[in-house]
Amino acid sequence: YLQDISGPVQLHHGTGDHSVPVAFAEHFYERLQAAGPPAELYIYEGDNHNISANFSTAMQRSIAFFDQHVKGEIAK
């Protein structure tokens, strides 16, 4: 179904996630790149499923992503 994705995708994943292995995000990201929509992947070393140790960074990246892809603003 990746060919049906019409918008950009941003992924965040902690390497210490015991619910979903980081390899899933990496594989998904690779497939997204091959399918064509803009995609970003951020890996947080040692962080958990909730990205609690890097939550602020993840949210800042998400806001910048939405500003760029939804609002059309260029990050400064």
Image (cartoon, rainbow, N blue to C red):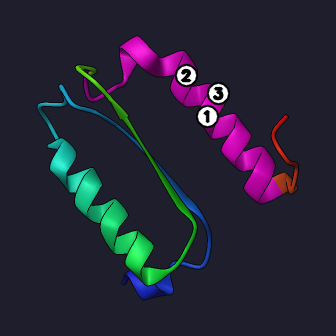
Q: Residues within 10 Å of mark 3 (few under 14, many from 20)?
A: few
In which quadrant of the rendered view does residue 53 lie? top left
Q: Are marks 3 and 1 in contact (CB under 8 Å)?
A: yes
Say which residue label 2 marks: 57
Magenta stretch: dominant secondary structure: helix
The local secondary structure at tag 3 comes to helix
What's drawn in magenta, residue-wise? Answer: 48-70
Question: In screen coordinates, is 45 left or right of 62?
Answer: left
Q: What amino acid type is highlighted by mark number 1?
A: Arg
Residue sitting farthest toward the front: 76
Say which residue label 1 marks: 61
Q: Residue at x 20, y 54 (%)?
A: 24
Q: Are marks 3 and 2 in contact (CB under 8 Å)?
A: yes
Q: Residue at x 39, y 79 (%)?
A: 34
Q: Residues within 10 Å of mark 2 (few under 14, many from 20)?
A: few
Q: Is residue 56 magenta?
A: yes
- Which quadrant: the C terminus? top right
Q: Residue at x 70, y 36 (%)?
A: 63
- Which quadrant: the N terminus? bottom left
Q: Residue at x 52, y 29 (%)?
A: 58
Q: Residues within 10 Å of mark 1 (few under 14, many from 20)?
A: some
Alpha carbons under labels 3 and 1: distance apart: 4 Å
Residue sitting farthest toward the top: 53
The circle on residue 60 is: 3
Q: Nearer the viewer, residue 32 or 6?
A: 32
Question: In screen coordinates, is 39 left or right of 32?
Answer: right
